[in-house]
Amino acid sequence: MTRDQAWMLLNEYTKSDSLIKHALAVEAAMGCYAERLGEDVETWRVVGLLHDFDYERWPQQPEHTREGAKILRERGVDEEIIGAILSHAESNHAEYPLDRPIRKVLTAVDELCGFITAVAYVRPERLTGMTPKSVRKKLKQPSFAAAVSREDIARGAELVGLDLDQHMSNVIAAMQRVSKELGFA
């Protein structure tokens, strides 16, 4: 599946502006890590773009990701992409373990992208000049973006084998590349 095909599919199933922007943020982070790791950038970006494309219609587990997987299989999408998307849902770890770089990175960047987006919304300069320090400050406030799992964010850094600040720096830099598309320009 090409990036253009993934974009069309995302927009077919997702109408929420915030979910589309989240997909763009995760796509950017996946692309960043694919470059760093010498992986297939387009494939990783497609995974990032589509990881929640079914969420608006099927937000509950186990339907979320499984219904999307059915749609992707009907369209002949590669099983590596489908497996990566399925792996980011905790209920699927037994069947789709976090045993490959693409799966680890998707899990590592998903919650962090959402949290960084929330931090950007409360900063006058948005993503510009954002540092891990400003993200950490908000992480310490349990009421801020309360739905975002701090445990998942910490575990994400472990999954990619980096300390949390470096992982945050990578994701912030990736999101800064697409700040206009995210509405932060």
Image: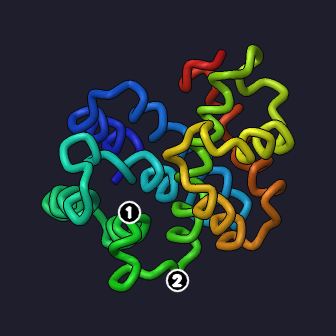
Rendered-image quadrant of the C terminus: top right
**Side of 83 relative to 151 (left or right):** left
**Side of 143 relative to 48 (left or right):** right
Out of 129 and 178, give the one closest to the viewer.
Answer: 129
Query: In percent of the image, x 53 and y 68: which residue is there?
Result: 102
Mark count: 2
Q: Earlier in the sequence, mark 1 or mark 2?
A: 1
Place residue 83 in its image quadrant: bottom left
Tell me if mark 1 has few (under 14), some (14-19) or many (20+) residues whose alpha carbon lies within 10 angstroms of its own: many
- Residue 114, percent from left and from top: 55, 42
- Give the residue number, with chain letter if any, for mark 1: 85
Q: Amino acid at mark 2?
A: Asp
Q: CA distance from mark 1 to mark 2?
A: 13 Å
Rendered-image quadrant of the N terminus: bottom left
Out of 113 and 137, give the one closest to the viewer.
Answer: 137
- Residue 77, percent from left and from top: 27, 62
Task: Give the secondary structure at mark 1.
Answer: helix
- Residue 71, percent from left and from top: 17, 56
Q: Is residue 76 visible?
A: no
Q: Amino acid at mark 1?
A: Ile
Query: In percent of the image, x 57 and y 38: which residue is there?
Result: 145
Tell me if mark 2 has few (under 14), some (14-19) or many (20+) residues whose alpha carbon lies within 10 angstroms of its own: few
- Give the residue number, with chain letter if any, for mark 2: 99
User: On screen, 116 above or below 50?
Assistant: above
- Residue 16, percent from left and from top: 32, 28
